[in-house]
Image (spheres, grey):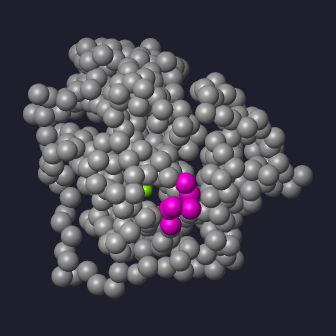
Amino acid sequence: MTQRIAVLGATGSIGDSTLAILAAHSQDYEVYALSGYQRLDKLFALCQQFQPARVCVPVSEVDSFAQRLNEAGLRIDVVSGDRGLIEIATDPQVDTVVAAIVGAAGLPSTLDAAKAGKRILLANKEALVMAGEVMMETVKRHSATLLPLDSEHNAIFQCLPLAIQQDNTQIHTASHGVRKLWLTASGGPFLHESFAQMQQASVAKAVKHPNWSMGQKISVDSATMMNKGLELIEACHLFDLSEEMINVVIHPQSIIHSMVEYRDGSFLAQLGSPDMKTPIAHALSYPARIDSGVQPLDLYALSGLEFIKPDLQKFACLRLARQAMQAGTQATIVLNAANEIAVAAFLAEQVRLTDIADINEQALSEIQVPLLDAHADIDDILAIDALARRYTETLVAKIAYGT
Ligand code: NAD
Ligand code: MG
């Protein structure tokens, strides 16, 4: 039977990779709905190519986009804004939601997809950083399925025994023997550069990742290693582990995508070319396997896989992520919000790359937020997110305008 897919964030990098696989397997997957926020010409072209039943655009664009589709003879239902994303994510016709919006903007639709019991392919790590407990609890309560697209988490998922894949609380059962998780990190474009060089980095240099081609925000996060920090928090929620059970190791070749260490001394790793189409194909077809179109690894050409301990002074964001995870959800929300504002300010050339960690640290230590307990809901989460964004804007302004 064909699976009906909604791709939220269809115009981005994960959207591209997902749609390439869906196009190659059109007999098994139907592109039922798409969303885009910027690059609406690209979204229009995708509507022509895939002819989805529904499309979501920003509120301000709904009339002009609908008219454009009409003129092209395309009968597609146009919805808009956050409400439109939720309509698509919960549409009874949809089996699988690919959550590939970047940042906090992806949280409400992902959470509602869980409430609607969907199969969710999660790229939007920020949703788990902000609302990990609520999200995991909602997935369980509504018998939704959450499959990680982030390459590291997808790798770990693949290296875990079936019983844990199906029920993450089983990771605590000693008989499964998991001792630790190892998240690999590429180290980004500044791995071998000094802090001073990093301080002077241009936007162009910071977004040029050595191994992966990704959206701008995650590329900056990789340069500061905040990405690995967010992934550490993501892993704690996905696999129901505390942060000390998860190690980070820099592996500049990005061939091993992460590992599970077992008590008998075994390390299980997932290897592959650094191409997101592999984890996406895995999650789309799980538990079956389909062709992803990715070049197989040439093992004879591979040599010298390196493993390096991260420098937490140079990559302070990684230290901050552990600290926030220990402090609790309210702190991970603040860290995520502060980081989104700081990264946007760096991309707008208002602050330096190395200011991002300072801004995040200041936000974490200065913003007074209530402790969130297990009963916190999405409104509590969004209120802390909004407060943290407003406060961080003032921190950015101080640096940008030297006040
Ligand atoms: P991207 O910037 O290329 O694309 C982001 C998508 O989100 C676009 O379709 C954009 O239109 C949409 N979007 C942006 N702001 C929005 C808003 N306010 N409302 C609605 N839609 C909005 O980003 P990406 O690299 O594809 O990353 C997407 C997510 O996947 C991120 O959370 C990222 O951390 C995660 N991820 C990406 C990669 C990768 O290789 N690109 C790998 C692992 C995880
Ligand atoms: Mg990743």
Q: Position of residue 19 (x, y in %)?
A: 26, 40
Among the 4 quarters of the image, the one containing residue 101: top left
Q: Nearer the viewer, residue 239 or 228?
A: 239
- Residue at 23% from the left image edge and 48% from the top image edge: 281
191 in the magenta segment: no
**Residue 301, placed above or below residue 233:** below
- Residue at 36% from the left image edge and 67% from the top image edge: 262
**Residue 303, placed above or below residue 234:** below
Q: Is residue 56 left or right of residue 131?
A: left
| Residue 357 shows up from this direction | yes
> Start and end of the magenta stretch?
242-247
Among the 4 quarters of the image, the one containing residue 44: top left
- Residue at 38% from the left image edge and 21% from the top image edge: 116
| Residue 34 shows up from this direction | no
Q: Position of residue 95 (x, y in %)?
A: 27, 26
Q: Residue furthest right?
A: 403
Q: Nearer the viewer, residue 53 or 234?
A: 234
Q: Position of residue 27 (x, y in %)?
A: 9, 33
- Residue at 65% from the left image edge and 63% from the top image edge: 319
Q: Quadrant of the N terminus?
A: top left
243 in the magenta segment: yes
**Residue 168, placed above or below residue 299:** above
